[in-house]
Image (cartoon, grey):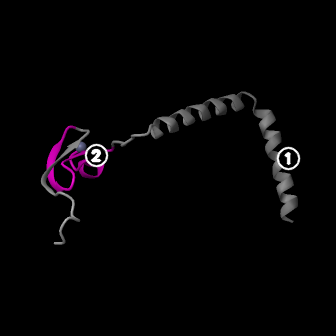
């Protein structure tokens, strides 16, 4: 090995997962922190749990909720929407021909 270019190697570096699991690996870092590991990742556990770190699932559920509100609103006035749909369909048919 060439001298003075290799980082220090820790043969027993400690990996700490956010689920509480810890194990050792060889690494150039003395301690590693992870969000998921082989003990808690859904692929290995087989359980349908969503790993959500940025709140994306929560955001999607909020959007679904808002959509349900809009659908309920448009259902209360069905005649207006029906006429809107028929006019736009007629225009599209003319453009295609
Ligand atoms: Zn874990």
- Label ID, residue 16: none
Q: Secondary structure at mark 2?
A: loop
Is disc 1's CB within 8 Å of ligand 1?
A: no
Relative to 58, 71 lies left or right: right
> Which image quarter is the N terminus in?
bottom left
Mark 1 surroundings within 10 Å by alpha-carbon count, few (fewer than 14), some (14 through 19), many (20 or more): few
Relative to 38, 67 lies left or right: right
Closest to the observer, 56 or 83:
56
Q: Residue drawn at (82%, 49%), measured in percent from left and top?
A: 88
Q: Residue drawn at (16%, 43%), measured in percent from left and top?
A: 22
Is disc 2's CB within 8 Å of ligand 1?
A: yes
Say if 9 sits above or below 37 in the image. below
The region drawn magenta spans 20-48
Say if 68 sits above or below 9 in the image. above
- Label ID, residue 87: 1
Image quarter for ligand 1 equals: top left
| Image spot of residue 9 (x, y percent) | 16, 58
- Kindly indicate whether the residue at mark 1 contacts the one at mark 2 (C-beta within 8 angstroms): no
| Image spot of residue 74 (x, y percent) | 71, 32
Gap in angstroms between the C-alphas marked 2 and 1:
53 Å
Q: Secondary structure at mark 1?
A: helix
Say if 92 sits above or below 56 in the image. below
Q: Residue drawn at (65%, 33%), measured in percent from left and top?
A: 71
Q: Residue drawn at (51%, 39%), measured in percent from left and top?
A: 60
**Residue farthest to the bottom, as pictured:** 1
Q: Which residue is mark 2?
A: 36
């Amino acid at each position: 090995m060439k001298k003075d270019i290799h980082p220090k190697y820790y043969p027993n570096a400690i990996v700490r997962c956010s689920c509480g699991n810890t194990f050792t690996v060889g690494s150039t870092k003395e301690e590693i922190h992870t969000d998921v590991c082989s003990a808690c990742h859904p692929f290995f556990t087989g359980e349908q749990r969503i790993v959500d770190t940025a709140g994306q699932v929560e955001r999607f559920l909020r959007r679904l909720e808002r959509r349900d509100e809009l659908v309920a609103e448009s259902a209360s006035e069905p005649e207006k929407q029906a006429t809107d749909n028929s006019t736009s369909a007629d225009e599209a048919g003319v453009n295609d021909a």
